[in-house]
Image (cartoon, rainbow, N blue to C red):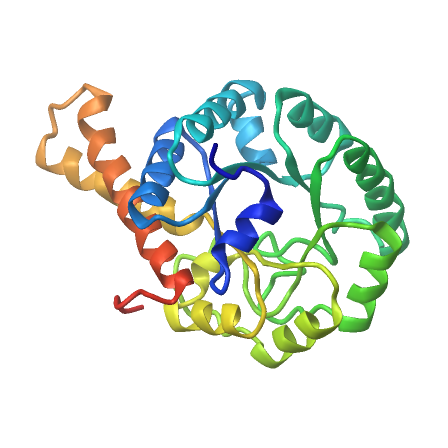
Amino acid sequence: MPLTSIPDLIAAARPGGLGAFNVITLEHAEAIAAAAESAKRPVVLQLSENTALYHRGIAPLALACLRVAADSDAAVAVHLDHATTAELIHTAVYLGIRSVMYDGSALDYADNVAATTEITAWCHERGVHIEAELGAVGGKDGAHAPGARTDPDEAVEFVRATGVDALAVAVGSAHAMHTRTAELDNDLIAHLAAKVPVPLVLHGSSGVPDHGLRAAVEHGMTKINIATRLNIRMTSAIRDHLTNAPDLSDPRKYLTPARAAVQSEVEHFLHLLAGSSTLGD
């Protein structure tokens, strides 16, 4: 049976980074799993709180992702991304998701620690891997806005106090970037990796050029979250297809090339994070 836990996938990805890709539609999940099979690399299917709101509940897409993961020949895990409520985390776990991110970054430090500690304890009682972050979510504007930086000493204390299994850190990236111009602070990444006793997670990776992502992994970043690049490729493929066939009404006809475009993009990133990509930025 393929590996499905985040720690196992992190180990399988080494010495490279673990690619984690956000799912909005079933086509995303199918494309990501197919890319993992083609690239022979582990992968994470991520469902965000915003996606759960879009679908008016997390259950339908979560159950579909769990099935896609179970049916794949690749090592595929399903992860809840940027959950801001315990209720959503509880729902995801009861559905069968074994990895979650609690995002208390909009809270002040003390409240973030208190809430994260409580949710971490609940998750660990059930064998669930938990990721958290410091600061306010950027891009979104805050912890991952280009100027924000995670303090290594504060990060160490946060992990000690909360018991989390992974930590999202601010090192120069930002969410929802359409240009790949973010410059990461590799010295800070290396400092964090040397001090923080849990894997580091890079959010907002779509805005980082290829060489920047390679350097981030080399300096100690472990899990690399990518969403916007997939949506750009999917939307572009749909737009091109409908432009060339303006009378088309069957969604399968334009979602097929869209799914293929997402798969191609994921394959590129998986090879890149493994250190084997020859493609440009």
Residue sitting nearer the eye, 154 or 217: 217
Quarter of the image for the C terminus: give it: bottom left
Q: In the figure, is residue 159 to the left or right of 27?
A: right
Residue 5 image position (x, y, % from top left): 59, 40
Q: Residue at x 79, y 37 (%)?
A: 124
Residue 243 image position (x, y, % from top left): 14, 37
Q: Residue furthest front?
A: 1
Q: Is residue 131 above or below residue 193?
A: above
Q: Residue at x 11, y 23 (%)?
A: 247
Q: Is residue 148 above or below residue 225?
A: below
Residue 196 image position (x, y, % from top left): 74, 66
Q: In the figure, is residue 180 to the left or right of 234?
A: right
Residue sitting nearer the eye, 208 or 65: 65
Q: Residue furthest bottom?
A: 187
**Image quadrant in which you'd find residue 248:** top left
* Residue 102 can be seen, yes or no: no
Q: Is residue 267 above or below residue 148?
A: above
Residue 86 image position (x, y, % from top left): 77, 31
Q: How many marks?
A: 0
* Residue 9 can be seen, yes or no: yes
Q: Is residue 244 above or below residue 185?
A: above
Q: In the figure, is residue 165 to the left or right of 75?
A: right
**Image quadrant in which you'd find residue 142:** bottom right
Q: Residue at x 48, y 32 (%)?
A: 1
Q: Residue at x 50, y 60 (%)?
A: 14
**Image quadrant in which you'd find residue 245:** top left
